[in-house]
Amino acid sequence: MDINEILKTRNLKRTAPRVAIVTILENSPIPLSESEIKGGMGHLYDRITFYRSVQTLLEVQVIHRIMIDNATVKYAFNRNVLSQLPTHEHVHFYCKSCHTTICLEQVPIRKYKLPEGFVQEESEVLIKGLCDKCASISDDFLSE
């Protein structure tokens, strides 16, 4: 995707940190932590600028945040950012063995039946378990 077009459609100025963050996340097949993004930014990384840039990109839904636990946060690029589709309404999976986080974009978040008077506006679903690679290693180990 053209990052300039993405920023333009969201009325954002093109800054080197924003471009770097979006490029790194767009090119990653999995969500990344701040330290993983920092490694790709090199000299462009500044902690305050990073957080301001990330907050802006979150607000305009270019990226989304995945809370793994109280200490671990990952970020992912919204692949349908230029479409009219919801940008991050999908399930996330965290592998407890290899610690990989995966956006399961083919698994939508469902509407939950809530008590009367409650209104669901958004949901975040994180499933924890073993990814397909770790599960197959576990199966191989158990069958020996």
Image (cartoon, rainbow, N blue to C red):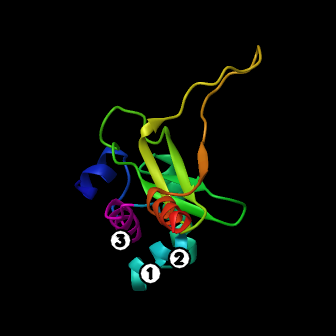
Q: Residues within 10 Å of mark 1 (few under 14, many from 20)?
A: few
Of circles 2 and 3, the one toward us is 2
Residue ID at (60%, 42%) = 124
Main SS category, magenta section: helix
* Mark 3–mark 1 distance (CA, rounded to whole Å): 15 Å
Helix, strand or loop for disc 3:
helix
Q: Are marks 2 and 1 in contact (CB under 8 Å)?
A: yes
Percent across and percent down for residue 6 are 30, 50
Q: Identity of the amino acid at label 1? A: Gly
Residue ID at (39%, 48%) = 78
- Where is mark 2, residue-wise? 35
- Where is mark 3, residue-wise? 16
Q: Nearer the viewer, residue 76 or 92?
A: 92
Splitting the image into 4 quarters, where does residue 52 fall? bottom right
Percent across and percent down for residue 94 are 56, 57
**Is 107 left or right of 80, judged from the image as shown?**
right
Q: Nearer the viewer, residue 81 or 126?
A: 126
